[in-house]
């Protein structure tokens, strides 16, 4: 009966849950391996990146369990912030700000709840056994309490502050946006040349944003620019608005950009802001929080930014002040959620100090072990690029409330720790009146940036402020697994806060995954029609096959989705199933004790090597390497070779026990990657001998004893057998049919003749002498050389077939040097007219 993955996967994931196999035991005396699971965003369907990333994490958890650790692998969800708000707006066709706040929050909770139920189901389907007894969600009062407490501590020690700063503002989402949330998109914009008039002169400036004309506070030119040098200090009139502004000189102006003269506006970009500070220019607010023109814009007041741009351009043209426009490409900072171009607004916000910790941050990052190491550079580059503190307040509804009340004079009263969790819109302040001025207090309606919640995950996981003894045991955690796209947010903020609040890094290791791309190598995108649904793939090939693919992707690199890897994974699963069926067939048929033969020593030696290498690979989070090693060992060394050798003597107890041990050890090693077939195999066959309730209760395999000399003989024996089997296939002799003789032509090798005869059904083995004739069947050039030789390549390959001397010593052809390594040579051998298979020091022939 073939393996039914659907039934098996359903059965064993139910079993794991029912038997609580993967539950963390607080009483256990074992060393803890703790994983700071990424709380998954409860905002929608699982995409392939989730399925990939959480499968990787699960493999690490299962491996360390086999290594005897008590594994802490919480199940958690991120249930805060804009992604959910935006989804709820879409789902119900409503606008958050037109809706009752508490009602809206309720809709968000419901939406998240429904998603979470699905997501837990998806995890189980993939064999991801995050521990439901360690469940948390960042929207729970319990979790938010510690977000608030950690903020209060930072506030009290001067690390968090209220300040007026220009912030990046999304007019669509009506909220401040942190630097880390800006997505730069290349867009085509118009660069417009506009005339400003001064006393007896005109100057043409270039701008991509004519709608900012009412907020123009100066014109700027480069002081080294001869065309404009003499105009510095003179006044000009802002067209339409008839306001006088000065021409200033600033080295940041690029003379080659447009006309080399530009406007300085207070809601322009970061460059404008620098000039405003440098030249002490005033702020003029021309765009409001919803992206509409303010009263400063006069007759354009109330228009959207785009409407104002069109109208102002039209009016400039009428007045003859518009010269020309041309399209240019520009990097525009946009909102990560809705792609709306961002504006700079001067706002009162809450900030957490980051800029003063830049050097510390790089030092802390160096103290962590990064997998792969190059990801640390990404964090360092990010830290170097930062220019402002972290703005942590958001003007949204669905997130952790900032635990603050304010009076009309702008004094802030922060909650007491023991009040938390607290919602200042519903709960009373710690004092009745403002302690500074005595006026009444109003609860803040601002909420925290979602990273304020998620960046305390290691603190929360380690029972920060909840249980001191546990905290000492659990902190720092062992591992933070995460995606590379959130190095500059989640990793960065977690390292910062962990260190600021506890003086220690939050983890020992950080592992960073790459992305799964579409089969065509591009990012998956609904509008490109190249999105792969992981659920469909699991239904088609099974979770193990899907995990096989994910394990094959190298850590930290982007990998295209390859359906053929799932096909291959499924075949590998069936191979394992057949190995166990093989054992099942032979169990209980042992009639003699027997003894260990050379091949048994050899397979033990190979197993030991595999154990060491797989252990190393898994230890350093290289699932791809572990998979390659195990696939090679199980498929080729074990199934194709050893099993075929040992088959003929499985009536011996020693032989059967050996193959039993080797197969079980292999399956235990692959079980973190392919948990379902492994558990299925264990329950079907091994459990009655091993006794434990699950394969995951066993230990990572120990090395087996072997004799080095015997193993050497065993390896040669295995090689002889595989070459002779090859000949049997080539000569169309059924593998089960007897042959009269296996001939070995060599200068004397030691092999186990009993296994050669037994596994090949040969009547005898004979050692002989004889001349070995070699014939070159084909010569193939390396593809690059083949291509550069164009039409002449085939001709050269033909010629080389006759010239072993040139193959050996190399040559030059059409000016290209060709050496031995550039060629793939297929040879055929024969001895005394009989077809042979040859290795470096012996040949094998077969006689029917
Ligand atoms: Zn937005
Ligand atoms: Zn006050």
Image: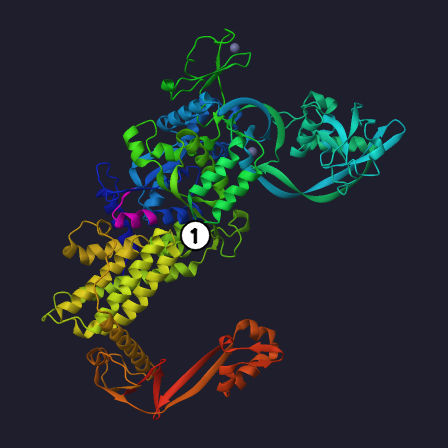
Left or right side of 831 for 257: right
State how many labels appear. 1
- Coordinates of residue 419 in the picture (x, y in percent): 37, 18
Q: Quadrant of residue 653?
A: bottom left
Asked if residue 69 is among those painted magenta in the image, a careful observer would answer yes
Given the current orientation, which residue lies at the most extreme left position? 591
Magenta part of the protein: which range? 60-71
Residue 171 counted in the magenta span: no
Residue hosting label 1: 555
Give the residue drawn at x 23%, y 63%: 662
Which residue is pictured at 23% across the width and 59% down the height?
Answer: 664
Q: Residue furthest bottom?
A: 832
Q: Can you tell which quarter of the image residue 501 is in? A: top left
* Whether residue 58 is situated above or below residue 590 in the rendered picture: above
**Residue at the spot 44% in from the left edge and 39% down from the top edge:** 44
Q: Residues within 10 Å of mark 1 (few under 14, many from 20)?
A: many
Residue 519 seen in the current view: yes
Left or right of 350: which side holds 690?
left
On the image, the x and y values in percent for residue 213 come to 74, 29
In the rendered view, tell whether residue 827 sits above or below residue 418.
below
Give the image location of residue 661, x and y in percent: 20, 62
Is ligand 1 closer than 8 angstroms to the Cβ of mark 1?
Answer: no
Front-most of residues 497 and 593: 497
Between 735 and 713, the one lying in front of the other is: 713
Q: Nearer the viewer, residue 408 or 455?
A: 455
Q: Residue furthest top?
A: 438
Which of the 4 quarters of the picture holds residue 685? Answer: bottom left
Can you see residue 2? Answer: no
Q: Secondary structure at mark 1?
A: loop
Give the quarter the ligand 1 occupies. Answer: top right
Q: Position of residue 1 (x, y in %)?
A: 24, 63
Q: Quadrant of the C terminus?
A: bottom left
């Amino acid at each position: 009966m073939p393996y039914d993955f659907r039934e098996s996967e359903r059965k064993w994931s139910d079993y794991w849950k029912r038997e609580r196999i993967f539950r963390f035991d607080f009483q256990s005396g074992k060393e803890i391996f703790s994983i700071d699971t990424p709380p998954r965003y409860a905002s929608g369907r699982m995409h392939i990146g989730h399925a990939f990333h959480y499968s990787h994490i699960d493999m690490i958890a299962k491996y360390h369990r086999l290594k005897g650790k008590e594994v802490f692998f919480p199940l958690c969800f991120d249930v805060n912030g804009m992604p959910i708000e935006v989804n709820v707006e879409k789902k119900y066709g409503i606008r958050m700000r037109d809706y009752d706040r508490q009602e809206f929050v309720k809709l968000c909770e419901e939406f998240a709840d429904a998603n979470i139920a699905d997501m837990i189901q998806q995890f189980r389907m993939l064999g991801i056994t995050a521990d439901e007894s360690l469940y948390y969600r960042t929207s729970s009062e319990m979790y938010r309490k510690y977000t608030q407490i950690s903020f209060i501590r930072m506030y009290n020690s001067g690390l968090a502050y209220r300040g007026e700063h220009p912030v990046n503002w999304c007019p669509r989402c009506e909220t401040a946006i942190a630097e880390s949330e800006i997505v730069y998109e290349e867009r085509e914009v118009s660069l417009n040349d506009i005339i400003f008039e001064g006393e007896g002169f005109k100057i043409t400036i270039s701008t991509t944003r004519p709608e900012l004309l009412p907020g123009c506070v100066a014109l700027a030119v480069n002081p080294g620019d001869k065309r404009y040098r003499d105009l510095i200090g003179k006044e000009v009139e802002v067209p339409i608005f008839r306001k006088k502004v000065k021409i200033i000189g600033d080295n940041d102006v690029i003379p080659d950009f447009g006309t080399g003269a530009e406007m300085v506006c207070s809601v322009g970009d970061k460059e404008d802001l620098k000039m405003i500070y440098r030249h002490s220019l005033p702020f003029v607010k021309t765009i409001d929080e919803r992206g509409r023109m303010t009263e400063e814009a006069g007759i354009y007041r109330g228009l959207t930014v785009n409407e104002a741009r069109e109208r102002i351009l039209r009016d400039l043209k009428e007045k003859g002040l518009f010269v020309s426009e041309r399209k240019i490409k520009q990097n525009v900072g946009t909102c990560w959620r809705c792609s709306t171009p961002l504006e700079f607004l001067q706002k009162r916000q809450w900030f957490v100090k980051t800029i003063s910790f830049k050097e510390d941050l790089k030092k802390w990052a160096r103290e962590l072990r990064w997998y792969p190491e190059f990801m640390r550079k990404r964090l360092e580059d990010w830290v170097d690029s930062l220019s402002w503190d972290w703005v942590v307040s958001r003007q949204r509804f669905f997130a952790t409330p900032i635990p603050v009340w304010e009076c009309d004079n702008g004094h802030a009263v922060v909650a007491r720790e023991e009040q938390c969790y607290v919602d200042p819109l519903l709960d009373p302040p710690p004092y009745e009146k403002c302690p500074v001025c005595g006026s009444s207090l109003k609860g803040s309606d601002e909420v925290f940036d979602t990273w304020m919640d998620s960046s305390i995950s290691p603190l929360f996981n380690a029972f920060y402020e909840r249980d001191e003894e546990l905290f000492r045991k659990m902190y720092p955690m062992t591992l933070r697994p995460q995606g590379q796209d959130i190095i500059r947010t989640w990793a960065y903020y977690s390292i910062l806060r962990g260190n600021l609040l506890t003086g220690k890094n939050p983890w020992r290791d950080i592992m960073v995954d790459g992305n799964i791309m579409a089969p065509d190598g591009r990012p998956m995108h609904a509008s490109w029609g190249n999105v792969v649904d992981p659920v469909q793939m699991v239904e088609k090939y099974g979770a193990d096959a899907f995990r096989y693919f994910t394990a094959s992707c190298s850590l930290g690199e982007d990998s295209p989705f390859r359906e053929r890897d799932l096909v291959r994974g499924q075949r590998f699963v069936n191979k394992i199933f057949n190995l166990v069926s093989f054992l099942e067939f032979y169990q209980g048929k042992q009639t003699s004790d027997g003894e260990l033969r050379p091949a048994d020593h050899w397979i033990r030696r190979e197993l030991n090597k595999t154990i060491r290498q797989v252990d190393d690979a898994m230890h350093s989070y290289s699932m791809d390497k572990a998979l390659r090693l195990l696939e090679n060992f199980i498929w080729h060394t074990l199934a194709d070779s050893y099993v075929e050798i040992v088959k003929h003597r499985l009536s011996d107890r020693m032989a059967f026990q050996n193959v039993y041990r080797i197969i079980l050890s292999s399956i235990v090693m692959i079980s973190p990657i392919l948990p379902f077939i492994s558990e299925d195999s264990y329950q079907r066959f091994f459990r009655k001998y091993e006794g434990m309730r699950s394969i995951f209760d066993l230990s990572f395999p120990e090395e087996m004893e072997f004799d080095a000399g015997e193993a050497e003989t065993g390896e040669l024996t295995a090689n002889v057998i595989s070459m002779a089997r090859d000949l049997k296939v080539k000569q169309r002799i059924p593998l089960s049919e007897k042959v009269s003789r296996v001939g070995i032509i060599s200068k004397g090798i030691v092999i186990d003749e009993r296994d050669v005869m037994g596994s090949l059904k040969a009547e005898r083995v004979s050692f002989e002498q004889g001349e070995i004739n070699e014939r070159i069947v084909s010569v193939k050039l390396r593809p690059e050389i083949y291509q550069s030789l164009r039409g002449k390549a085939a001709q050269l390959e033909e010629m080389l077939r006759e010239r072993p001397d040139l193959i050996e010593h190399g040559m030059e052809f059409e000016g290209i040097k060709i050496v031995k390594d550039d060629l793939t040579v297929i040879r055929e051998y024969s001895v005394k007219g009989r077809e042979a298979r040859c290795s470096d020091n012996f040949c094998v022939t077969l006689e029917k």
